[in-house]
Image (tube, coloured by chain):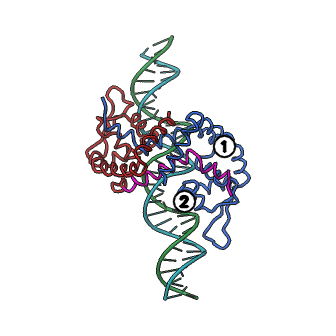
Chain colours: A red, B blue, C cyan, D green
Amino acid sequence: MMDSELRAFQKNLPMALLRARETVMGHFRPLLRLHDITEQQWRVIRALYGKPGLEVSALADKTLLLMPSLTRILKALEEREFVTSSMVEGDNRRKLIRLDHKGRAVHQMMSPLSEAEYKKIEAKLGAKKLKTLYQLLNDLSD
Amino acid sequence: MMDSELRAFQKNLPMALLRARETVMGHFRPLLRLHDITEQQWRVIRALYGKPGLEVSALADKTLLLMPSLTRILKALEEREFVTSSMVEGDNRRKLIRLDHKGRAVHQMMSPLSEAEYKKIEAKLGAKKLKTLYQLLNDLSD
DNA sequence: CCCTTTTATTTAACATGTTAAGTACATTGC
DNA sequence: GCAATGTACTTAACATGTTAAATAAAAGGG
């Protein structure tokens, strides 16, 4: 027999998005652990890669991290010498964050593995469906 | 000019899912704050609503919460008398969680508001697209 | 200039995410 | 029965999410 209250609960957009995200992240978490970095730290490293540097706010936007979280994450990444920071000339409120040697090294090692996992997901769902999914997620995010 | 590294970063499934989820949650967070409950506490309340009771593990499955998080959440919900817990007869390892009066009251008040916000999202994206999205998210989560 | 307002980042406090370890009870196989 | 193994839940420790408040510097207006 059906339980309409249960259905309403299970068919729920935030949870459907969360479940899908957890499934996807399940593929990537083992890779992250290899380098002892968190998912959020990896987002920061990826956002900085190939850039001359980014200010903290710009980094927060790109990584979807809130400023207080990012402050702590950058502190940890600096301690591990994955990134460096410096004041912005002409505006001492701003900080410029740059990827350092060790951070670039992690990117070089992780990136191919990450790409390979992504290809698996693409293969499983199908490229066409995946493209549709991106489109719909984008529509939703506007 | 285009930066292929940036594109690879921005077009990234976990972040696309996260961004979409944040957009959706942006609609619901003000409602949650009205009753001073968190998103996760609301998931627990919804999962319990209309049920005679659920064991902690079953609740964790339904709400996509990890057991250690759920332990703390249930403690908070019990202190606020939104739920009650009791040992399961015949197996003293298990706990049965039930929604209490105050929890049901919160559900009654929140549920219509939540439903109204959901309808807004549905209207904005379109029912057909939304259905397709659910389908794709489901495919991904298998 | 100086005072007010805005902007960029950090700190604080509490809730949750995450992995590992602990605890207590149940089950299994001998 | 009982020792070994498995199951259900909790605790611990540290990272991040979230909101509010603090800090410091820049911008603007008189």
**Residue shown at the point (31%, 46%) measured from the top left:** A82
Task: Indicate whether residue A29 is drawn in magenta.
Answer: yes
A115 vs B81, nearest the viewer: A115
Q: Which residues are magenta?
A: A1-30
Residue A72 appears left or right of B129: left
Classify mark 1: helix, strand or loop: loop
Classify mark 2: helix, strand or loop: helix
**Residue shown at the point (31%, 31%) measured from the top left:** B2
Q: Earlier in the sequence, mark 2 or mark 1?
A: 1
C1 vs A5, nearest the viewer: A5
Residue B19 appears left or right of A117: right
In this view, C3 is above or below B74: above
**Residue shown at the point (39%, 48%) measured from the top left:** A122
Is residue A68 at all visible to an observer of this figure?
no
Q: Amino acid at mark 2?
A: Met
Q: Quadrant of residue B115?
A: top right
Is the residue marked by circle 1 packed among few (<14), some (14-19), or many (20+) residues within 10 Å?
Answer: few
Place of residue B139 in the rendered image (x, y in percent of width and height, measured from the top left): 49, 50
Check disc 1 and report the residue beneath it: B35
Check disc 2 and report the residue beneath it: B67
Place of residue A121 in the rendered image (x, y in percent of width and height, measured from the top left): 40, 50
